[in-house]
Amino acid sequence: MERQQPIEKELVLIGGGHSHAIALRNFAMNPLPGVRITLISEQSNTPYSGMLPGHVAGHYTYEECHIDLRQLATAAQAQLYVDQAIGLNLDQNQVLCTVHPPVHFDTLSIDIGSTPELPDVPGLLDYSVPVKPWRFFLQQWQQVIERVIQHPDQPISIGVVGGGAGGVELVLTIQHQLQQILQAAGQSVSNLTMHLFHRGARVMTGHNARIRNRFQQILIQQGINLHLKKTVLQVQRGKVLCESGFQVECDTIFWVTRASAPIWPRQSGIATDNRGFIQVRPTLQSVSHPHIFAAGDIAAMVESPRPKAGVFAVRQGKPLAENLRRLLQGESLQIYKPQSKFLSLISTGDRKAIMSWGALPLGNESAWLWRWKDAIDRKFMDQFRELPIMGADSSSEPLLPMQCAGCGSKVGSSVLEQTLSRLRQDYPPCRQDILVGLAGADDAAVVEVPPDQVMVHTLDYFRSLINDPFIFGQIAAHHSLSDLFAMGATPQSALAMATLSYGTDKALTETLYHLLAGATKVLQQAGAELVGGHTTEGAELTFGLACNGFIHRDRILSKQGIQPNQVLILTKPLGTGLIFAAAMRQQARDIWLDSALQSMLQSNQVAAQYFLKHQATACTDITGFGLIGHLSEMLHSSPIQVQLELASIPAMSGVAEIISQNIHSSLYPQNLTAGNWVANQSQAQTHLLWPLLFDPQTSGGLLATVPKEHADKCLEDLNDMGYTHSSIIGTTVSNQPQTSNSLQKPIFIH
């Protein structure tokens, strides 16, 4: 007997808001047996709204105020799809995405927040910046900071449109941060001018009179130009125009108005209110579709209407997780009733805050209130950084019949038939030389071989390193095809090998389609075709491809073609092994992982073409054996010595920090034995980045030798084609013998 719970139901979460973050942590602590969780989020982290004003003011770093969704999803054993949901197919229970194929669900939860309600103002989107989505605002805000840092002596004018609590807090925090920068640069704070535009007669109308009056006093005391009863009519480059004819010049304009809903939930047919927010029952279920839940700003509680505030999203997280669990387990749901009023601690920008609590006459700012808010916010964020040991005790898992081995472990014919039928429809064949492929049910594929060329074969197969089968399929295809590109071959066809986690036919079909769709997308972009393969069930997702291609006999680009007086060019940065090893230990930042994935999803095909154009004589792709391991293969039995410039070798973001923590890939100790090829090993290994030379890469770059006279143009072309990390990392010379019978070690590192 073996303990293995198959996937029986699909829970999909759209959006990485506060409610879903709390729910995922709940599922990490107490897993849902037999349920596969998929989180669809537009980015791999999510901001905590309570700390964003402090981040703008300079009190918190970006990492301190963002929840790492990739780490959280891993802890909850959930899939993370970094993508944008754009609709629902409610007839087939599918989420429609921008990049991924439709995602099936049995139960769905939506927590996508809100967007600013933007009026029809000419130039608004062209010349101003809405504060939501937050990631776009923060990108623009960082540009403002860099401008002031680089040119502190130049005057700058900032405008904020919207006099609610969000606009008032934003204008104060912006002013604080920029004034701190100016003072640190020895410049006068008078170089900064702040404007707040509001069409009402008073700011912060959602709060009591004392709060409103005090904040209005603070704005005036801080020298912020307060423009009340001013409705913005038009935004031009560097200028705000109001209905009254009033005009103000502003270098940057931020737009903070009341919340509105994205349009796609209403268009999908789910019940919404007149503003487009999803109507939910006290159980947080949709009033029209009980298998769909909504929480946070996107939800409109029909029986208990509440304003759009982050505090409600936080409070909804626990009951949402509980009711999702209950619905999936066939139990009755619990009623959630939100509090009628809530405490607000509103920052004044300077590490002080004002308390707002309903109609109570509170209104004085203080440092201790800000410290209290800071403690509350840090405690909230700590729960996502100090994740518990995941998974329930194995003794509590149900005992299931032992899964068969051999051909008995194959995925069923109905799963294959459904998957391949859908794949053929979405990715129709693109080559004429595939005589027998996916279109038939034959025992093997049959391909046509050009009479004047030879065939090149390669095979790669490995465990999934990311909880997204569509992206994993793409990475695996790029990785496999790179062997062909390194030889100078043109790919033709591929056979897939997949091991899928145990599950129902519906779950297996969903996984297999996403996996093969990702691989097929990359194959067809390279001009190749998926022609067949083999599938089986197992404990974890693994995938690989056997690829073949063609090349003229006299144009084979092998590893052994290295010659003296050449340069070594590497097309991608190193570090995927280190970054994913750190991720397994919850020590990798989301931005490091995003950057690594972006690199792995870049094809080496065009780079190989440009190497051939510039008369490269030897090439290999850097994969499992690391840079030194693959370079040593090029130098095997060759009378060539390589002078490597360690400082020129491109490294991925975060690599140095990971190495300093003594984190390495499991293959690193074996790869390290290739250090024996390094002539000055004892000296080179004192360098911080020495371990990077032996780091195993997944879908790594190409390493090629190019004649020196072609080097600069080759590098220029590679950069123009998107290989922006391409670098000349060394040169080749004739290897001089140490004695009459032996050559010295061929790699010398500077």
Image (cartoon, helix red, strand yellow):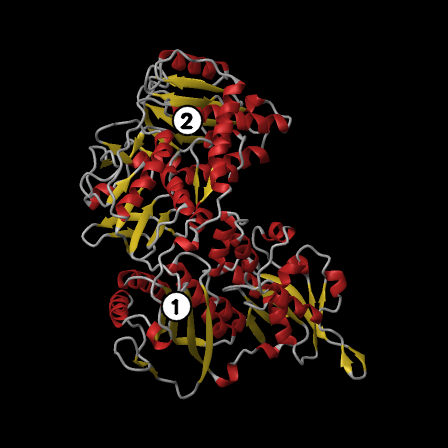
Residue 289, relative to residue 48: is it above or below? below
Image-quadrant location for residue 624: bottom right
Quadrant position of the C terminus in the picture: bottom right
The numbered dot on residue 499 is 1
**Residue shown at 25% from the left, 27% from the top:** 305
Give the residue at x 39% y 72%.
Answer: 497
Q: Residue at x 75, y 66 (%)?
A: 680
Q: How many marks?
A: 2
Q: Position of residue 443 (x, y in %)?
A: 30, 82
Q: Is residue 505 visible?
A: yes
> Which quadrant of the rendered structure holds the N terminus?
bottom left
Identify the amino acid type marked 2.
Answer: Val
Whole-percent x and y of residue 73? 42, 49
> In front: 58, or 72?
72
Give the spatial CA distance, label 2 vs label 1.
54 Å
x and y percent of residue 614 in the render?
Answer: 55, 71
As helix, strand or loop, the secondary structure at mark 2 comes to strand
Instruction: Specify whether 242 is left or right of 623.
Output: left
